[in-house]
Every structure is written in structure tokens, then in C-alpha cells.
Amino acid sequence: MGLLLWITIGFIATGFVVLIRTRKGVENKVAYIKANMEGEESLNKANSIIWWIGCTTAWGLVSMFLVVWCFHSY
């Protein structure tokens, strides 16, 4: 098997592990924001959630690109 396939599998697997490990923290931040709508800390938590969503989206797009590239190469 080629190096590209192993890189793709490793990238996707690592992303899933990170996603699963950070999901609970994000859920806790959302619950905190719902309970405390005012304050600087809520704003900071909201910004970190937005970054998490953006990074997760970028990971998904790169994963799709790598899968398509693998199918094109083989």
C-alpha cells in the first residue's frame, strides 16, 4: 500500500480521536453559555466553540480531499 493511503488513514483516524476527546468539553462550554449569557467568559467560550467548528470543518474537507486523491491515484 502506498504512503498516501497510510497518510490518509492516519489523518482521518487521528481527527476522529481528537474530535471524540474534545466533544464533551465543547458540550460543557455550550451548557455554560446557555446558563450564563452575559460576561466576558461566555464570549471567550463562544469564540473557542466557533474555532472548534471551523477546525472540524477544515479537517473534514481535507479528509474528503485526501480520500478523493487516493481513489484517483489508485
Image (cartoon, rainbow, N blue to C red):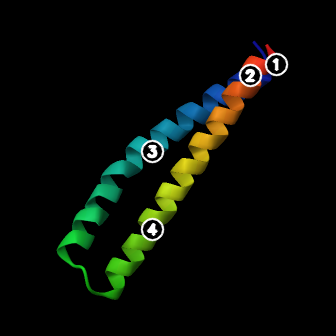
Circle 1/circle 2 CB separation < 8 Å: yes
Q: Residue at x 55, y 49 (%)?
A: 57
First of labels 3, 1 by sequence position: 3
Query: Which of the labelled discs sits on residue 19, or is there none?
Result: 3
The amino acid type of the residue labelled 3 equals: Leu
Q: Residue tagged by mark 1?
A: 73
Residue 6: image location, x then y, percent: 69, 23
Q: Residue at x 73, y 18 (%)?
A: 71
Front-lying residue, 12 or 71:
71
* Cα gap from disc 3 to disc 4, whole angstroms: 14 Å
* Cα gap from disc 3 to disc 1, whole angstroms: 28 Å
- Residue 61 lies left or right of residue 19; in this view the side is right
Number of residue marks? 4
Secondary structure under tag 2 reads: helix
Q: Residue furthest bottom?
A: 39
Q: Quadrant of residue 66?
A: top right
Q: Where does the C terminus fall, quadrant-wise? A: top right
Secondary structure under tag 1 reads: helix
The amino acid type of the residue labelled 2 equals: Cys
Q: Quadrant of residue 12?
A: top right
- Residue 64 lies left or right of residue 2; in this view the side is left
Q: Residue tagged by mark 4?
A: 48
* Cα gap from disc 4 to disc 1, whole angstroms: 37 Å
Residue 24: image location, x then y, percent: 31, 51
